[in-house]
């Protein structure tokens, strides 16, 4: 009996020791691989470093999943559990999931192709569909963009059909400069070249510009401007900084050289005579418009003044009314006169008769 207890205890100890060794082994493998990846990443710069920043989270997640599955299978086999039925069941389950979650499978496949072909990386400014922003997170299933106001857009790879990468290796800042029709386009081109040379020679922007300003020429004629197109080649993420500085200097240069940059306005055309001369603007028209406007304003003020006077008169009439109540006057019924009046009439008639006698 004692021998059985010792053997039982020894067998339990062996299981615990085996489990402990397997855990230590897989944790050590994970830490060694993770340290090797980080060491290789620290020795890279620029484009290769951003490439590794994109692939590193994906590689870690895949390796962690594989390591976890292998460790679980080995532990189960050490406890005497047959893992072959589990593997067969996992295969059937994978087929069922593949048929039932086709969108999820499409996410993984599309994400793998996009990452493998290096269409985008962490830190790139991309446009996917109608979403524009900087890539912050890439997984095997989705990509996260953060736009200029801080909004985070999460896009599954199954929804990605077109990827516009604005910062792939290098960038161009495109200018469409509009000047008035009266300006000399050659003079404007020389001014733009001088601005580009000055910007490229500055200490702050000389390392950001990869090539001098390229003047493409007069591109088209707009409604009120002649459009001159140009572009400048910059580092991938610095085209907006260079473009804003170029626009600032261009505005100052155009103001100094009296080059008109058209803005929305309206021109009144009165036609031409037979000699090609434009007639003078009829001053009578402006005078009539001024008179009409002044009359409308005067009539409005007059109505307001009359209204105030009526209100003041009404207030004065209300103040003049007496506050005490009037005593009621008795009314006479019909055409009857009071008795005193009848008596006085009879006395007068009697006195009249005596006088006649």
Image (cartoon, rainbow, N blue to C red):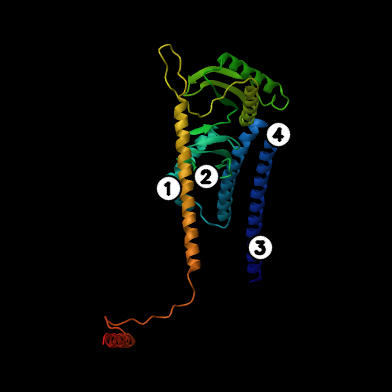
Element marked by disc 3: helix
Question: Under tag 4, what secondary structure?
Answer: loop
Vertical position of residue 327 compared to residue 224: above or below:
below
Residue assigned mark 4? 43
Q: Nearer the viewer, mark 1 or mark 3?
A: 1
Q: Which disc number belongs to residue 10? A: 3
- Of marks 4 and 2, the one in the foreground: 2
Residue 247 picture quarter? top right
Q: Residues within 10 Å of mark 2 (few under 14, many from 20)?
A: some
In this rendered view, identify the residue nearer to me: 130 or 6.
130
Residue name at image x 69 percent, y 42 percent:
35
Q: Earlier in the sequence, mark 2 or mark 3?
A: 3
Residue that numbered label 2 is attached to: 154
Would residue 7 be seen by someone viewing this image from the given angle?
A: yes
* Mark seen at residue 131: none
Pointer 2 with pointer 3, Cβ within 8 A? no
Q: Residue at x 52, y 19 (%)?
A: 181
**Marking on residue 101:** 1
Decide: few, some or many residues near mark 4? Use Cα within 10 Å; few <14, some 14-19, many ≥20: few
- Dots 4, 2 in contact, CB < 8 A: no
Between disc 1 and disc 2, whose residue precedes? 1
Foreground mark, 3 or 4? 4
Mark 3: few/some/many CA within 10 Å (<14, 14-19, 20+):
few
Q: Is residue 312 left or right of residue 271?
A: right
Between the C-alphas of marks 2 and 3, the distance is: 54 Å
Mark 1 vs mark 2: in front = 2
Residue 345 drawn at (x, y percent): 30, 85
**Distance from Cα at disc 1 to Cα at disc 3:** 48 Å
Q: CA distance from mark 3 to mark 4?
A: 49 Å
Which of 3 and 326 lies nearest the eye of the viewer? Answer: 326
Judge whether 219 appears above or below 105 on screen.
Answer: above
């Amino acid at each position: 009996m004692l021998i059985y207890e010792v053997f039982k205890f020894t067998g339990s100890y062996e299981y615990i020791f085996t489990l402990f060794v397997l855990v230590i082994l897989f944790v050590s493998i994970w830490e060694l691989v993770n340290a090797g990846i980080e060491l290789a990443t620290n020795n890279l710069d620029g484009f290769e470093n951003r490439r590794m920043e994109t692939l590193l989270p994906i590689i870690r997640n895949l390796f962690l999943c594989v390591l976890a599955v292998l460790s679980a299978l080995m532990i189960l086999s050490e406890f005497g559990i047959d893992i072959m039925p589990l593997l067969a069941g996992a295969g059937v389950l994978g087929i069922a999931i593949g048929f039932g979650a086709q969108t999820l499978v499409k996410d993984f496949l599309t994400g793998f192709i996009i990452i493998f072909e290096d269409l985008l990386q962490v830190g790139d400014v991309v446009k996917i569909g109608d979403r524009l922003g900087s890539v912050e997170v890439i997984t095997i299933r989705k990509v996260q963009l953060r736009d200029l106001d801080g909004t985070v857009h999460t896009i599954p790879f199954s929804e990605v059909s077109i990827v516009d990468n604005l910062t792939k290796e290098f960038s161009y800042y495109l200018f469409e400069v509009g000047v008035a029709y009266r300006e000399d386009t050659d003079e404007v081109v020389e001014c733009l070249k001088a601005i580009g040379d000055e910007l490229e020679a500055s200490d702050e922007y000389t390392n950001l510009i990869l090539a001098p300003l390229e003047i493409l020429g007069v591109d088209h004629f707009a409604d009120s401007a002649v459009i001159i197109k140009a572009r400048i080649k910059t580092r991938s993420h610095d085209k907006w900084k260079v473009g804003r500085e170029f626009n600032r200097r261009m505005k100052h240069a155009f103001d100094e050289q009296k080059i008109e940059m058209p803005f929305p306005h309206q021109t009144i055309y009165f036609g031409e005579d037979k000699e090609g001369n434009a007639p003078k603007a009829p001053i009578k028209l402006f005078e009539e418009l001024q008179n009409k406007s002044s009359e409308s304003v005067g009539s409005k003020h007059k109505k307001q003044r009359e209204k105030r006077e009526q209100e003041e008169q009404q207030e004065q009439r209300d103040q003049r009314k007496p506050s005490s109540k009037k005593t009621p006057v008795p009314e006479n019924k019909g055409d009857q006169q009071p008795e005193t009046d009848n008596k006085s009439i009879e006395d007068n008639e009697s006195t009249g008769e005596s006088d006649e006698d």
